[in-house]
Image: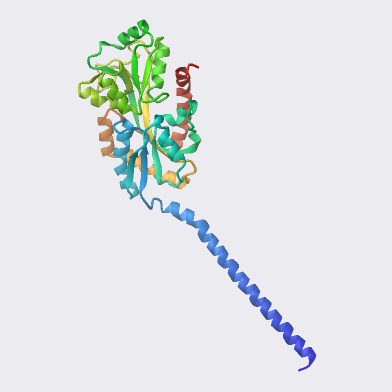
Amino acid sequence: MTAASLVGVRVSKEKTVVKTLLKSLAVGTAGLLALTGCASGSNSSSEADFPAQDIRLTVPWAAGGSGDLTARTIAPLLEKELGVEVIVENKPGANGSVAYNWLKDQKPDGYNLSMMGVEVATLQFQDYDIDPSNYAPIGQGLAGPGAIAVPVDSPYQSLKDLVADAKANPGKVTYSSPGVGSVWDSPAQGLQELAGIELTSVPFDGSAPAVAAAAAGDVDFSIDAIGTQKNQVDAGKLRYLAMLTEERDPKNPDVPTAREEGIDLQNASWVGIMAPAGTPEEVVSKLSDAMGKAVEDPEYKKVIEGSNLVPTFKDAEEMTAFLDEEADRYGPWIKLAQGK
């Protein structure tokens, strides 16, 4: 073989090697892209498959209140809609902020949720590191119209009696509060402003112990949801003094409204569910849809209405706007409590 032929063979072999390398590189790149596609599609797949495991639903309040009742009533109905177990766990303390702070640090995948109340919107005005932007609302489950109730043997026979005593004895009349700045402490600030009186708050970790304290006679009155006070009223330990509703409560027609007693004060608590901020929209939508169906369930309505609460649903988008409205409403009352 001539020298020229040898060179030609060598060049041909080199070209073959280069082609083989390029082909291998192309196959490897395609494989890498395929793997990348699978990886990027895995999140979408997991969201589409949600839920694939049990869900934990935390309650920021002590057992026995309307929030706890809602959680334990709605959990099995959510299970029916979602096909997984919903585990209820109480984390009371610091006006709900213990549970709220816990939730914001959880992975935003829809498997860790919390009941929520107005505190999500109002604690930002106090010395709490609670920012509504850290949460993704799922929906509202109920509204709880409020009332003022006193121990059954209280000398107050009307709201006017209570106001008159508070005017004569500034700071001597006490009320039990579920926490400073809470949904039921704030209207007490409104009562003081509207009536021109000074009251003393005795705070507790949640509505249930606050109402129990009033029933035991440890404070002069309770200002809380009608439904939360109902068990103590039925047990003959509390009696309603005035309703914080626009019109008289159909289930308690003999009890006047605060407006009828000369104090134009209305307030209602509400309870909802939320997830950590950043939870995928598809997951939030699935949870919100399931919650909406649960709130419409006859069994849910029976329990909630039987406790003098009102089954009420707002979806995730509506609740986001509602939180802003609640912040605007309660902010001035909280400033009153702070002496500002």
Total labels drawn = 0
Figure check: 134 above or below 206: below
Figure check: 2 above or below 189: below
The residue lying furthest to the bottom in this view is: 1
Q: Position of residue 236 (x, y in %)?
A: 20, 21
Q: Is residue 326 left or right of residue 23?
A: left
Residue visible at 48% across and 16% down in the picture: 339
Residue visible at 31% across and 39% down in the picture: 74
Q: Nearer the viewer, residue 96 or 287?
A: 96
Q: Quadrant of residue 222?
A: top left
Q: Quadrant of residue 306?
A: top left
Q: Is residue 32 left or right of residue 284?
A: right
How are the colours assigned in the image? rainbow
Q: Is residue 299 left or right of residue 93?
A: left
Residue visible at 24% across and 24% down in the picture: 232
Q: Position of residue 304 (x, y in %)?
A: 28, 33
Q: Position of residue 140 (x, y in %)?
A: 38, 35
Q: Quadrant of the N terminus?
A: bottom right
The residue lying furthest to the top in this view is: 168
Q: Position of residue 283 (x, y in %)?
A: 43, 47
Figure check: 22 above or below 270: below
